Amino acid sequence: MRIPVSGLSMQLIRLLAFVVGLGLIVWTLRSVIRTFVLPRSANDRLTRAVFLSTRRLFNIFTERATSYAERDRLMAYYAPVSLLALLPVYLAIIMCGYAGVYYAFGVEDVFEAFKVSGSSLLTLGIAQAAGSGPTVVIFSEATLGLIMVALLIAYLPTMYASFSRRESTVTMLEVRAGSPPSAVEMLLRYQRIHGLGQLGDVWRTWEVWFAELEETHSSLPALAFFRSPQPEHSWITAAGAILDAAALTNAVVDLPHDAQADLCLRAGYLALRHIADFFLMNYEHNPKPTDAISVSRQEFEAACDQLAQGQVPLKADREAGWRAFNGWRVNYDTVLIDLAGLTMAPYAPWSSDRSRLHKNTASRST
């Protein structure tokens, strides 16, 4: 029996609707698994597109802000809003995908296919499709909708638990390094309480912190944009202060060498690099100890003078100290500044003060 051309065309259209619809469903499920389930760093295009779109919207308002405090208040909503936006985006794409499947199974009207899909996904029960095939599809879509909501509900407590652990250590740093955190201030404070010999405990604590930071901020990347409860605190400026304090201690402070400072530095710059890798940042993976850094020799000398005035014991050879400090700093200099700019971190010396945000703010104020 010969099939009319119009009938053949309709079959092809329904087949195409099924293929496209199934593709959308699989693509979205892959994104959901990579974002919420996979216990490793996975840069997903759909999730990235949602966060970038939300960031562009927030940038419209932050660029009009006249102060950092105003920008900080706005950016505090960025990560939560982006996370919440993921669910309706996922559900909308899945609904479109299933609408194509229902249309392929014989639902005559496109609008009716969307109605059946939305009713099934949200378990509303306001529309049905006849037949055993569509019934199986309806059950699968309803199950998928419930799973999506459950995943987001389970995801948020995990994120906030990691956020709480991160922030408890960041908050304690204010006692040791001031606000904003400064490597020089940290060493001066330890000298005042005759505690330079206790720095090994600090390096151990922050080595563990960096290890957790790498794991959580690459597998749960939205955490990078969750801002500290105090506007002047930030995980990235805290990281910069600790790394600079360890680098200065190794380079210029006249103490017996502590290998724990080396371990803290390595844990720190590897953590920042892995986070930067997730956000597709460019940096030199194998820098030379003599490569240029954003901290100038004059700034280094001024820091050494401050330490000397605070009676911190310093090594006599400043030239060797500068080479040693440069050799450590070059490992994390670029990623530290870029991450500070990405997260719109508050002002802190030798880290966020070199980001484009603070440079632009300074230029507007002059």
Image: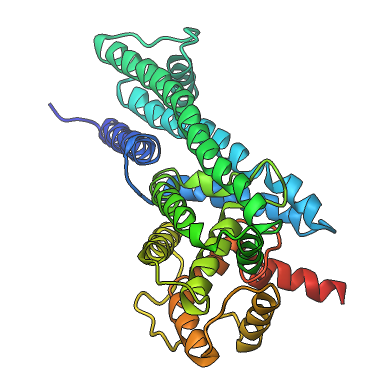
Q: Is residue 107 visible to us here? A: no
Query: Which of the 4 image quarters holds residue 268?
Result: bottom left
Q: State the residue at coordinates (66%, 50%).
A: 175
Q: State the residue at coordinates (71%, 56%).
A: 179
Q: Position of residue 93 (x, y in %)?
A: 45, 34
User: Is residue 26 placed above or below 126 in the rendered structure?
Assistant: below
Q: Position of residue 170 (x, y in %)?
A: 58, 48
Report the number of numbered marks.
0
Q: Is residue 269 visible to us here? A: yes
* Residue 340 left/right relative to 250: right
Q: Position of residue 257 (x, y in %)?
A: 40, 71
User: Is residue 171 placed above or below 346 in the rendered structure?
Assistant: above
Query: Which of the image's four quarters has the N terminus?
Result: top left
Query: Which of the 4 image quarters holds residue 108?
Result: top left
Query: Which of the 4 image quarters holds residue 361?
Result: bottom right
Q: Nearer the viewer, residue 78 or 137?
A: 78
Q: Position of residue 12 (x, y in %)?
A: 27, 37
Q: Residue furthest front?
A: 194
Q: Residue furthest left?
A: 1
User: Is residue 193 placed above or below 74 in the rendered structure?
Assistant: below
Q: State the residue at coordinates (85%, 59%).
A: 66
Q: Nearer the viewer, residue 58 or 252?
A: 252
Query: Which of the image's four quarters has the C terminus?
Result: bottom right
Q: How is the image coloured?
A: rainbow
